[in-house]
Structures are given as C-alpha cells and as structure tokens.
Amino acid sequence: MTKMESPRAHWPKELQDDIEANRFNACVGSVLVSETDRVRVWHLRLPPGKRCNFHRHVLDYFWTCHTHGTARGYFEDGRIVDVKHFPGDTKHMHYGAGEYLLHSVENIGDTELLFTTVEFKQSDNAPLPVPDEIRLQKAA
C-alpha cells in the first residue's frame, strides 16, 4: 500500500461508496424499538446474504446476539473480520470523548442473525441524531 492509498482500496466500490455516504449514520440497528433520556434500544435483523449500512458508534453500548450465525465485519481501517455468533453472545463497548467505531456487518451464514443493541446516551460523546423513519411505529 502506498502512503496515499486508502486502507480500503481492496474493497469493492459498493462498500467504499457506502462507508463514505454513511460516515455519520447513527442507525446502529434496523429499527429503534425504544428510547428514553438515558438509552436507545435497537434491533438489528440480518437475513442470510444481507449487510447493514455502515454506521458510527459514539455512545457506550452493549450488544447481545439472539441467534446462531456467522457475520463479516467491515471496519474503517480496512479490516475484514469474520465472527461466529451464538445466542447470548454479548459485548460491551466504551468510547471516550472524540472516539468512535465506523463499521458494517454482513450475514455470511445461512441463518438469520438478530441482535439487540443498547446505547447509553449519557456517554462521553453526544448522541448523533436518528431519523424518525427508523423508529418503531406504534399503532394508534
């Protein structure tokens, strides 16, 4: 890699375009199912062969996987990491002031992946805005 070459130069153009378009995307799941002044609760549902858009984590959070499956993570630094998930897998993350994670997750297995992510709004960074259309619509 030359000094000026992107660490993602080996990625397909679709991934390179998606990371640029979603640098500040706060939608860390498929749907925001609950939000209070303290937390945001997300569900991420990934059928086999599907990938979520790149998104930015700035808040402290944890995720829990509810299903068996295999995911491929794409990271801003160019890494591509495959992970086998099992029901109950949980990971806690912390980001200091100005820190973040920009990534995307693809389901490369043959079973649906379902995650719950809980973000803590009282973190070292302010929450990024979330569009209304990503929020769970309650029946009237």
Image (cartoon, rainbow, N blue to C red):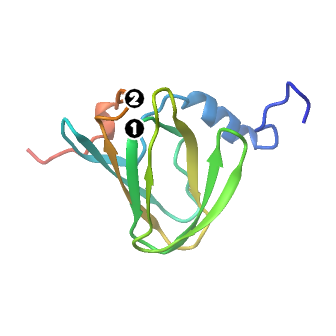
Q: Quadrant of residue 12?
A: top right
> In the current view of this chain or complex, which residue is farthest to the left?
140
Which residue: 27% across, 41% down? 135
Residue 117 location (% of width, % of height): 37, 52
Q: Is residue 58 left or right of residue 5?
A: left
Which residue: 22% across, 39% down? 38
Q: Is residue 17 left or right of residue 53?
A: right
Which residue: 39% across, 62% down? 64
Q: Label 2 vs label 1: CA separation? A: 6 Å
Quadrant holding the C terminus: top left
SS label for mark 2: loop
Tell whether label 1 touches label 2 (CB within 8 Å): yes
Q: Is residue 75 left or right of residue 88?
A: right
On screen, residue 72 above or below 55 = below
Identify residue type, mark 1: Leu
The residue that label 1 is drawn on is 59
- The crowding category of the residue bearing disc 1, from other C-alpha atoms within 10 Å (few below 14, some 14 to 19, many at least 20), is many
Identify residue type, mark 2: Asn
On screen, residue 48 above or below 24 = below
The residue that label 2 is drawn on is 125
